[in-house]
Image (cartoon, helix red, strand yellow):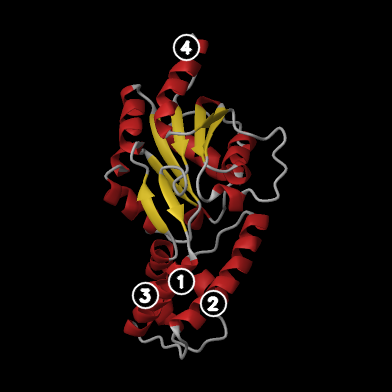
Amino acid sequence: MLRALIFDMGGTLEDVFHKPEFNLPCGEALLSYLEGHGIHFDLSPGDFMNRLEERYRAYRKWGVEEQRELAPFELWSRLLLKDAEYNQDRLRVIADHLANLWERNFYRRSLRPEAPAMLQALKDQGLCLGVISNTSSHSQVIEILHQYGIRHYFNCVYLSVTSGFRKPHAQLFWAAAQDLGVLPEECIYVGDTVSRDVRGARLAGYKASIRINSMLTGGADAGLNQEGEEADYLIANLNEIPGIVSQIRNKNT
């Protein structure tokens, strides 16, 4: 029986991308915010971002290998702003907002236009819906779901930064199913990567996985031997999902 669909956020429900020209305004926004809270850096926005990007890439490599996510204060104090002198208590209070600024300024995000109608169609079929997202901010995903006007569709939202684990760690997928009151084998996961989304759903024993390509897919899955690991269903548009659900349900009747 199929009872729930759980979605990835960035690259799946929303389009996400980064370009080098985003770095300077991102650096300006971060430095201005830090300055406003009494944390000063004698660096230009460009130099500041060069340092952050290098350290963030090293952190992301570690996070992917270990399937772990650090809390915002740990990430910014221990890694991204290490070796700088500032008031640690001030950073502790603002760390999540700083992470939120990073997620919103380093990347550009927009809801896939077909997402609301697709989610409504799934709700009309009586399915439970959830989100599992890898993110460095506690607040950004929740805020943007509200901004997109789709937060009410989801019965649970699991974030890597809250759990401490990154996809494809199976615990995230098990916990989401548990919160929805269903078994893993009654769930489908929808994502844009094999390495995080398809692999995680299989490790957790989900019924199936659906994958849509995004601007993040190539980088996330680079160098991955995908033989035998591709999703059960490949789609080009989220509007294909309700039909896939009906097809699966008809097979089970």
Residue shown at 44%/86% (left/top)? Answer: 87
Question: What type is the residue that disc 2 sits on?
Answer: Asn
Residue shown at 46%/91% (left/top)? Answer: 42
Separation of marks 3 and 4 at Cα, in angstroms: 51 Å
Q: From the top left corner, tell me how far across and down residue 49 is, in percent.
A: 50, 76
Separation of marks 2 and 3 at Cα, in angstroms: 14 Å
Mark 2, residue position: 50
Are there few (<14), some (14-19), or many (20+) residues within 10 Å of tag 1? many
Under circle 3, the secondary element is: helix
Question: What type is the residue that disc 1 sits on?
Answer: Asn
Mark 1, residue position: 23
Are there few (<14), some (14-19), or many (20+) residues within 10 Å of tag 2? some
Q: Which of marks 2 and 3 is nearer the N terminus?
A: 3
Mark 4, residue position: 250
| Contact (Cβ within 8 Å) of mark 2 with mark 1 | yes
Under circle 2, the secondary element is: helix
Separation of marks 4 and 1 at Cα, in angstroms: 49 Å
Question: What type is the residue that disc 3 sits on?
Answer: Ala
Separation of marks 2 and 1 at Cα, in angstroms: 8 Å
Mark 3, residue position: 29
Q: Earlier in the sequence, mark 3 or mark 4?
A: 3
Q: Establish if 97 lies above or below 187.
A: below
Q: 134 and 114: which one is in front?
A: 114
Question: What type is the residue that disc 4 sits on?
Answer: Asn
Separation of marks 4 and 2 at Cα, in angstroms: 53 Å
